[in-house]
Amino acid sequence: MDKEVEPAVLAVINEKRLSGEKRTPVDIIAKMGVPDARDKASDQAWIATGDNVIATVWAELVSIGAGGRWFFIESLDTQRRIGGGDRSALQIQRAKDRLGLLKRSLDAGQGVRAVLQTNRVAIREAESDKAARVSTRVPDDEEWHVAQWEPARKFAVLVRGARGWLPGDEDMQAARTRANIPSDAPEAGPGGASADDPQAAAMGYLASHFASYGYKAEDVSAQKLGYDIEVSDKKGKVLLQLAVKGTATGKTGFRLSAEERAVAAKGDPWRLAVVTDAFGPATQHKLYRSSEMDKAPGLEPF
């Protein structure tokens, strides 16, 4: 909503909106070179002609730092909405696609073309309100770039304009609060694990994943049953017993305990669930039956 936008940012949006011909949100990205724009109107980032990355920048979350520099804090948590709560499977996939394109631009040393967008509902409700619509979307003439990428701390920083500048600590903290990104203080995860623990991140990821499909995912790790998450349907029927292993950069190996191997030997519904890139934007998982688990990358000998 306009009232959430910094006045300097809103002024640029209004000038751009009023000085150009009236275009719909679809027309905007089509004009910027996005093929099949109508089919991709709900996406949050796009590849345009010339291999250019275009990304939505929510104006409500643009902050202004020293010297009037604009910056935007990007959450790298694909599971959680800006306003809190779990994303749906579709929302998770859109967030992953967006972060994948932003990381691609970073790795290639390229800039990002931005479309500045305001919404008809408060930004914290934009993903949870089914009636939410784009209020205004305009192309920004200034190039943006990914200036900082912190997967372990679950955020990235996008900066408008020339490279070589980052916001100060005070501006960063205010922006993180605005974007509902937790502070750097480690938080407790399942079983009291630190949020820096890939196992905790993997547990949270899988719980959200199965919940988004309507299943109950119960953390039973404290019971030492030989698995960590029990997945059941709405009638209470147990579908899966998951021994969860999270991996991340620098922490790619894992072992199965004696209890886990004993339960694995019994077969269904036990599965080894390996979550890779537990802290990053490309988090994904794969399930292995007991007969397949020795092929799981990272599994160390018993």
Image (cartoon, grey):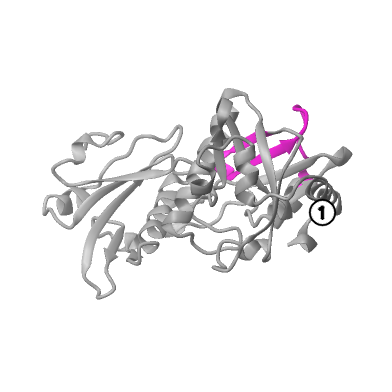
Q: Position of residue 74 (x, y in %)?
A: 63, 46
**132 on left or right of 223:** right
- The amino acid at mark 1 is Glu
Residue nearest the observer in this picture, 147 or 278: 147
Residue 192: x percent and y percent?
46, 58
Rendered image quadrant of residue 190: bottom left
Horizontally, is 13 left or right of 199 in the view?
Answer: right
Q: Quadrant of residue 297?
A: top left
Residue at the far bottom in the pictured view = 235
Residue 196 seen in render: no
Most distant residue in the left direction: 266
Q: Residue at x 82, y 39 (%)?
A: 69
Left or right: residue 8 versus residue 247 is right
> In the rendered structure, does residue 158 fall within the stretch colored magenta?
yes
| Residue 112 percent coordinates (x, y) | 65, 33
> What residue does disc 1 label?
6
Q: Residue furthest right?
A: 67
Q: Quadrant of residue 248?
A: top left
Give the magenta part as a residue range.
145-171
Residue drawn at x 88%, y 38% as measured from the top left:
67
- Assign a secondary structure to mark 1: loop
Observer-nearest of 197 and 46: 46
